[in-house]
Image (spheres, rainbow, N blue to C red):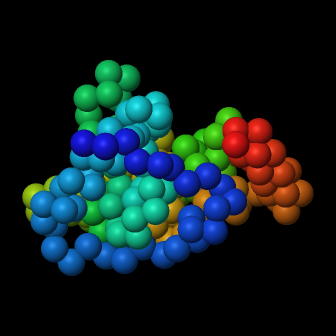
Amino acid sequence: MAILEILVYPDERLRTVAKPVTNVDDSVRQLVKDMTQTMYNANGIGLAATQVNVHKQVVVMDLSENRDELRVLINPTIIEHDGEQVYDEGCLSVPEYYAPVKRAERIKITALDEQGEIYELDADGLLAVCIQHEMDHLAGKVFVDYLSRLKQERVKKKLIKRARAAD
Ligand code: NI
């Protein structure tokens, strides 16, 4: 396993649209393992392949306190959505920044697991938020895109400054 580098906003590579996985093979399972380790290492609850500069539709997620309820979503598709909720979101690609985003309250998705088996999942609350957030990454979107232009500029400046300081 390996810890992968996480791209940081406003890195343009986060704008790449991910392609569907055509064959869930050992290379995809290896990617899932590496992404899982990377997510746990960074104390995140979700990670999309886009964030580690791999442009395939793969997401890992774990909302449990004990970090033992891994969810793998390959080629996730929202087939139903309903209602509205606002949640204060954060992102491993937007460190130390949180802002409220409006999303669907309930969703139903289909996805493949790491064996390539299709499954359906009904999600609401934080799980629904997290799935929509990660699916945005696969489409080349970041939660900051939903904020005002002024807030977007502020967070951009802050993170560019932070990256310079770390060099
Ligand atoms: Ni994110």
Residue 40 visible somewhere in the drawing? yes
Q: Which residue lies furthest to the front in this view?
A: 167
Drawn side of residue 159 relative to residue 62, left or right: right
Residue 102: percent from the left, percent from the top? Answer: 64, 54
Looking at the image, is 70 positioned above or below residue 122? above
Q: Residue furthest right?
A: 150
Residue drawn at x 26%, y 73% is 21
Residue drawn at x 40%, y 59% is 49
Q: Which one is nearer the viewer's eye here, 30 or 64?
A: 30
Residue 25: percent from the left, percent from the top? Answer: 13, 65
Residue 124 visible somewhere in the drawing? no
Drawn side of residue 96 relative to residue 77, left or right: right
Drawn side of residue 87 relative to residue 129, left or right: right
Q: Quadrant of residue 28?
A: bottom left
Q: Which one is nearer the viewer's eye here, 61 or 7?
A: 7
Q: Quadrant of residue 15?
A: bottom right
Residue drawn at x 27%, y 63% is 74
Q: In which quarter of the image is the C terminus?
A: top right
Looking at the image, is 69 positioned above or below residue 163? above
Residue 130: percent from the left, percent from the top? Answer: 47, 48
Looking at the image, is 166 positioned above or below residue 145? above
Residue drawn at x 63%, y 68% is 12
Drawn side of residue 159 relative to residue 17, left or right: right
Q: Quadrant of residue 87?
A: top right
